Image (cartoon, helix red, strand yellow):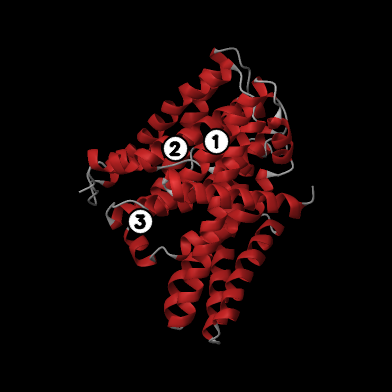
Amino acid sequence: MSSYDVATVLLCLVAIFSYINEKYVKLPTAIGLMSISLCLSMGLIALNFLGLPFDDKVAAFIGQIDFYEALMGCMLSFLLFAGALHVDINDLKEQAWPVLTFATFGLLCSIGLIGATSYFLFNAVGIEISIWFCLLFGSLISPTDPIAVLALMKGSDAPESLRVKIAGESLFNDGVGVVAFLVLLGVATGTKEPNLSNIGGLFFQEAGGGIVLGMILGYLCYWLLKNIDNYVVEVLISLAIVMGGYQLAQLFHISGPIAMVVAGLMVGNQGRTLAMSDVTRDHVDKFWLLIDEILNAVLFVLIGLELLIISFSPKQFVLGLILIPLVLAIRLFSLSIPVAIMKKFRNFSPNIVKIMTWGGLRGGISVALVLSLPVGPEREILLVVTYMVVVFSIIVQGLTFPKFLKKFPPR
């Protein structure tokens, strides 16, 4: 099948599942689509046991989709820009220290703890795996997924300060997490020496370069927008900034995700308020909202269908069940430390650590990163446990988050 055929089939599935969810299931869109997609995958697997191997054909179709390239090389740039576009930078400034601390210290603490504990866990059950691959697992599962988190925040009644902390952390720790993943991948595969100079240099290049490029792109977009008043052209400019900017980031080997977040924040605040008319602002907002919703729908359907190409063994399944609460416990601990320190200088909402732990969903980015690992036994085990953590996170944590807020009120 051609790429166009694959995209057509996938969009038809997304449309059908969206209708079923809206008409009958009535779950939040992202969770509903993924749940329906998972049910389809499990149904096809069940039919295979009955002698009707429909899952082989669907698995072959899914196998044609490069999930990593589809998300990290295409969809992510649009989703991060659209998410950052509607974050109020003044609110973000008020929460700057908590957001940056959670997205750096908290994230790196989580990566180290998950890497160390998973290393001992895997080796305890007879799975030989290097510490570097365990740290890679920590780097891909520690960041909260901004796509899933922003979708969750849209339907919650959390106070604005808490929403900004959770959304802001997810936007920035995703970029930092991807950079950490790339650094550790180079060490794990032997292309980079595991010394502080190499690791620090690559981290600075990726993260620092992403911030600088994002600021340049954001200002360029603002300058272009303020000189015209035609919403069609202005929508095209924003689209070109995202697509061209992400390609530039890949060309110069700097962080595209960080660049898109920074550019989105600048365009969404300075650009929307100072360079757009009311008509243009309305069209730009609706355009990016539509892009966000469509790509989100495609992404969560894809996550559900990925079940068909993952092979589970009993040992891997048990490890996944152990790692689900372990990852949550480490996130709780990694957030508790900076909150305990910063409480001396600023006020925090009651139960903030518990809420951010349960509301910190993992999603498609974790799956995409683990699928990018080189083929081998390490990839197979990490794919299974990552997928289990992601599915639990989106379905169980996502569905119970409103009740969780009522049980642990943030006010």
* Image-quadrant location for residue 24: top left
- Is label 1 in contact with label 3 (beta carbons under 8 Å)? no
**Residue drawn at x 58%, y 54% as measured from the top left:** 76
Describe the element under mark 1 as helix, strand or loop. helix
Alpha-carbon neighbours of circle 1 within 10 Å: few (<14), some, or many (≥20)?
many
Q: Give the residue at mark 3.
A: 164
Residue 37 in percent (x, y) is at 56, 40
Residue 38's tag is: 1
Instruction: State which tag comes first along the sequence, 2 or 3.
Output: 3
- Is label 2 in contact with label 3 (beta carbons under 8 Å)? no
Alpha carbon distance from label 1 to label 2: 11 Å
**Residue drawn at x 60%, y 12% as measured from the top left:** 126
Alpha carbon distance from label 1 to label 3: 31 Å
Residue 19 can be seen, yes or no:
yes
- Is label 1 in contact with label 2 (beta carbons under 8 Å)? yes
The amino acid type found where label 2 is placed reads: Ile
Along the line of sight, the residue nearer the viewer: 386 or 106: 386
Describe the element under mark 2 as helix, strand or loop. helix
Instruction: State which tag comes first along the sequence, 1 or 2.
Output: 1
Residue 395's tag is: 2
* Image-quadrant location for residue 393: top left
Residue 262 can be seen, yes or no:
no
The amino acid type found where label 1 is placed reads: Leu
Viewer-nearest of labels 1 and 2?
A: 1
Alpha-carbon neighbours of circle 3 within 10 Å: few (<14), some, or many (≥20)?
many
Along the line of sight, the residue nearer the viewer: 309 or 141: 309
